[in-house]
Image (cartoon, grey):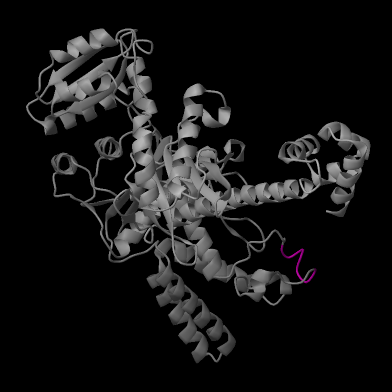
Amino acid sequence: MYITENDNPRIEYLRDKTHRLTVSPGCYIMKNKSHEIIYIGKAKNLKNRVSSYFRAGQDHLPKVWKMVSNVYDYEFIVTDSEFEALVLECSLIKQYKPKYNILLKDDKGYSYIKVTNEPYPRLQAALQKEDDGARYIGPYTSSYAVRQAVTEANKVFMLPTCSRRFPQDIRKQRPCLNHHIKLCMGVCTGRVSQDEYNAIVEQAVDYIASGSEPSVKRLTEEMNEAAENLEFERAAQLRDRINAINKAAESQKIVDEKIKDMDIIAIAQNAEMACASVLMYRGGRLFDKSDHFLGEKMDAAQMREQFLMQYYSGREKIVREILIDEEFETLENVREYLVQKSGHNVKLFCAQRGALVRLSELARSNAAEYISNRTGRTKREVTALEELSKALGLEKPPRFIECYDISNLASTNMVAGMVVFENGRPCKKYYKRFSIKTVDEQNDYECMKEVLRRRFENYFAKTDEGFSIMPDLILLDGGKGHVNAVAPMLREMGINCALFGLVKDSRHRTRAVATGSGEISLSKSRSAFNLATAIQDEVHRYAITYQAKKHRKNAYQLELTKVRGVGDKKAAKLITTFKTKDALKAASADEIAKTAGVNAETAAELKRIIDEM
């Protein structure tokens, strides 16, 4: 989005002031007309950085455009180094909390593990204590960790999670599916005594409080004691419980003895907003998790830098290892700040392979889930758009994606389909169909050029709502030849939009994304690959359906021209007027004669042929 005098009448004054700025590092402070601070930034070259906000023709993200539109004046503070500017920026943001900076907010409250007050207690996660006689364990700072722990304990110790009440509902209904697949001990069968059940609940609480190793040790002692007392059935039950704990410890990510104290940080974003998620491991166990809404999306590197600075500037203790999902240019400056603040060495790094990559993906998945809850989009859609954006090197995840496909039978009935995906979902109200007008012989490149030219001519003319949106990404069903054919034409029209092709394999399945010079594989980005495949399948379906419909219509029209005295124009008029075959069959000979402008004898022959179709 470009800034003009209509957006900000002070733009010329701001540009003139910026020409005189120093090239030294420092901080700049943007203010609105009421002299309120609305944004604080830092730069290693103040003149270059501040000029980028007010430069004519500079394309801005929506959030930056809003900020620049409200700038009335600005101040600046010169520093000796970029690192000093980074620290000063963090301090000023913390002090003034400007509207357009990232302001960390999370939904954190205290959580508890609740042991309900009933003859057969249940384990539940609770957000607050109530005066209900239940036993509450906690508080814990992370509701996420509490939910994970309760779910795991209920599964390992086969505790009931259904809505049945005990002992009232014992033996009244058949056991549910959970009992049959060994996820529930089956209290409803009446085979588990109240004392035995309560003992198992206490084991589950102990497991949550102390972890798997101490629990296994205590249960093993109980198992051996039961075996010595010839209580073989009880010993077998304890053995199965020990096996379940060991199996859970192998598969879950909650406990990892190799990771002592570490924060894992990842940021997810869609086309409009971003969120950061922090997984906190302490003593080899997932201790806490926090999600932070970052507001409207901004530059990826700037987001990570500002989040790290603000997040750790407000914390008394900083761990020695911080895993981030992506590296950025000023990472070493941020690490130096963390070292100075904490008084010890800090490893700030990005994982390349192994278990740490999976943990980084887990953090990103949590951030994506947080966005999906706020926006109504699914986590899969958020992840797919983010992966596609990174694979294609886009500045941000695309909100509007348009995809085009040409369909024909040799050189007849040549058509094209345009489908639109908004935030990863088909937006059918914007779908468009094209009949090829300027290409007489089969030539996919020329057909694609005609379709894209007509589409953007309509964009400039503003004649149709479906053409009024500038897409963030254009995909062509074809390889680099299609991209190279269309790209020069779009540049001539002044269209600056990401353009790629979708390449299929010998089985007509999506294989890769084509650029003008090669291909980009999506094999390592499963969500992005599935989205690209869905888009390509949808545009192919849409185009070929239109081509088949047009072919049937033309074949129908050809049958009508077999009647003497009926040419293409008269046949077309009949089809256009009555629209469907059923409507044409229902028409009388007189209506046919009047519509086509033929005599009664010709109309009767037309009626006969129509009825036979």
Q: Is residue 66 above or below residue 547?
A: above
Residue 396 shows in the view: no
Task: Report x, y in % for residue 556.
Answer: 75, 49
Task: Report x, y in % for residue 126.
Answer: 55, 49
The quadrant the N terminus occupies is: top left
> In the drawing, does residue 362 fall left or right of residue 538?
left
Q: Nearer the viewer, residue 230 or 212?
A: 212
Q: Is residue 88 above or below residue 226?
A: above
Task: Report x, y in % for residue 582.
Answer: 84, 46
Identity of the residue furthest to the left in this view: 80
Q: Quadrant of residue 115?
A: bottom right
Q: Residue at x 51, y 69 (%)?
A: 203
Residue range corresponding to the magenta coloring: 166-172
> In the drawing, does residue 182 fall left or right of residue 3?
right
Q: Nearer the viewer, residue 116 or 185?
A: 185
Decide whether the magenta segment is chiefly helix, strand or loop: loop
Q: Is residue 539 above or below residue 451?
A: below
- How many numbered marks appear? 0
